[in-house]
Image: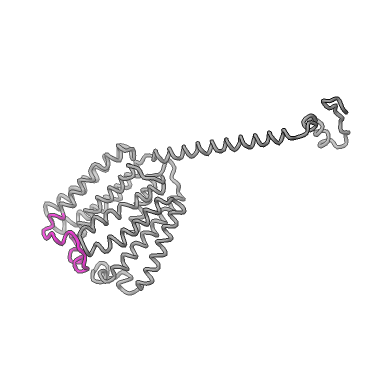
C-alpha cells in the first residue's frame, strides 16, 4: 500500500512540475508521503487487531501475531505521521501538508471503522487512494487546477473494479473478519461485476481529457483508451460469467493497468503551464526588485559623492598614479580651480 501511495504521489509531483523537475523537492515529497502513509497504515492495524487475527491473509501481521504491542505501534504511528506532515510543510507547502494530514484522518478514523459498518467503505477508500497524486501536484505547483484531476480520477475509478474483484475472491475471509463488503449481499456476483464494469467505462474518456486539458500529448489519449478498453473487456467477461476465474483475471488486469497508465502519463506529459507562468512571474519580480536595489545603491553612492569636498573632486587622478607606482618621484603640484597653489 505505502509503495503505491508514494508512487502516485511522485507521479503527481512530476505532472505538476514545469519543464524542470526539482529532484530534491520530489524526494522530500515522497519521503513525507511515505511517513504519513506508514502512520495511517499502522493506525489501521492498531484498530483492527482482532479483525486481522481472524483472517488468513492478515493473521501473520506484527500486531495480531503479538510481535509488536499496540501501544508501541500507536506511539510510532503518531510520531511518524507528525514528522511526515511537518516535512511536507517545511520542504513543500501548507497545501500539501494539509492534504496529507486530511488523508491520514480520513483513512484511519473514517475508512477503517466504516469497513465494519457499511459497504460504502469501498468508495470512501477510493477517495483516500485518489488524494496522494493531488498531494504531489500541490507540492510541485503550490495549487490545484483542473488538469490535476486526471490521475486522481483514474485512481478513484480504478480502485472500484480492483477491490470489487478482490472482495469477490475473498468473501469468506472478509466475512470471518467482520467486514461489510458489497459482495456479501450479492451471492451471484452480478451486481459486483456490473459496478466494476460501470467504473471501467467512466475511465474511457480520461485519456482524451488529459490531452484536451493540456496535460499530455495526443498519443496518450490513444494509449489510455486502449488500456482502459482492455480492462473493460475483463470486467465485461466477469459480468457475463461471474466466477472466480474471471474475477481473478480482472484483478490481475487491474494490477497491470495502473502502472501502464501512469507510465504513459509521465512519458507523454507536457510541462505544467501554470507552474511555468509562476516561475516566469517570480523571475520577473526578482529582476524588478534587483533593479530597484541597484537604483537605490546608485542614489546612495551619488549622495556620498556629492558630500565630498570640492578639492577632492578637483584633484586629477594623475596625482594618485604618481604617488602609488613611483614613490621616488615628487608629487606634482596642481593649480586648483580658484587659482590657488
Q: Nearer the viewer, residue 243 or 340?
A: 340
Location of residue 74 (image quadrant): bottom left
Above or below, comparing residue 278 to residue 117 in the picture: above
Magenta includes 178? Answer: yes
Here the colouring is one colour
Point out residue 113 in the picture as x, y percentages from the top left corner. 26, 64
- State the quadrant of the C terminus: top right
Tally of marks: 0
Point out residue 205 in the picture as x, y percentages from the top left corner. 24, 41
Prevailing secondary structure of the magenta residues? helix
Location of residue 42 (image quadrant): bottom left
Location of residue 88 (image quadrant): bottom left
Point out residue 55 in the picture as x, y percentages from the top left corner. 23, 69
Magenta includes 43? Answer: no
Q: Which residues are magenta?
A: 168-192
Q: Is residue 291 left or right of residue 208?
A: right
Above or below, comparing residue 31 to residue 311 in the picture: below
- Picture residue at 21% right of the left edge, 49% below the top: 199
- Picture residue at 31% right of the left edge, 58% below the top: 106
Amino acid at each position: 500500500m505505502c509503495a503505491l501511495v508514494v508512487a502516485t504521489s511522485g507521479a503527481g509531483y512530476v505532472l505538476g512540475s514545469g519543464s524542470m523537475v526539482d529532484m530534491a523537492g520530489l524526494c522530500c515529497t515522497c519521503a513525507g508521503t511515505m511517513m504519513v502513509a506508514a502512520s495511517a497504515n499502522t493506525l489501521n492495524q492498531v484498530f483492527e487487531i482482532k479483525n486481522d487475527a481472524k483472517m488468513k491473509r492478515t493473521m501473520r501481521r506484527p500486531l495480531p501475531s503479538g510481535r509488536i504491542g499496540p501501544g508501541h505501534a500507536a506511539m510510532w504511528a503518531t510520531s511518524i505521521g507528525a514528522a511526515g506532515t511537518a516535512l511536507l510543510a517545511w520542504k513543500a507547502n501548507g497545501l500539501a501538508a494539509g492534504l496529507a494530514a486530511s488523508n491520514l484522518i480520513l483513512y484511519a478514523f473514517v475508512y477503517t471503522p466504516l469497513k465494519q459498518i457499511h459497504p460504502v467503505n469501498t468508495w470512501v477508500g477510493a477517495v483516500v487512494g485518489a488524494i496522494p497524486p493531488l498531494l504531489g501536484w500541490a507540492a510541485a505547483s503550490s495549487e490545484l487546477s483542473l488538469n490535476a484531476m486526471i490521475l486522481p480520477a483514474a485512481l478513484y475509478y480504478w480502485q472500484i473494479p480492483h477491490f470489487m474483484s478482490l472482495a469477490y475472491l475473498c468473501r469468506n475471509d472478509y466475512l470471518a473478519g467482520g467486514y461489510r463488503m458489497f459482495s456479501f449481499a450479492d451471492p451471484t456476483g452480478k451486481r459486483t461485476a456490473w459496478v466494476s464494469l460501470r467504473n471501467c467505462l467512466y475511465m474511457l474518456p480520461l485519456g482524451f481529457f488529459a490531452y484536451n486539458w493540456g496535460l499530455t500529448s495526443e498519443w496518450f489519449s490513444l494509449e489510455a483508451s486502449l488500456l482502459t478498453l482492455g480492462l473493460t473487456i475483463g470486467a465485461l467477461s466477469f459480468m457475463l460469467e461471474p466466477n472466480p476465474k474471471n474475477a481473478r483475471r480482472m484483478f490481475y488486469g487491474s494490477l497491470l493497468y495502473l502502472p501502464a497508465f501512469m507510465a504513459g502519463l509521465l512519458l507523454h506529459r507536457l510541462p505544467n503551464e501554470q507552474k511555468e507562468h509562476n516561475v516566469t512571474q517570480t523571475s520577473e519580480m526578482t529582476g524588478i526588485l534587483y533593479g530597484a536595489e541597484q537604483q537605490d545603491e546608485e542614489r546612495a553612492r551619488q549622495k556620498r559623492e556629492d558630500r565630498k569636498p570640492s578639492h577632492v573632486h578637483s584633484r586629477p587622478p594623475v596625482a594618485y598614479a604618481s604617488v602609488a607606482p613611483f614613490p621616488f618621484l615628487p608629487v606634482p603640484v596642481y593649480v586648483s580651480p580658484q587659482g590657488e597653489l
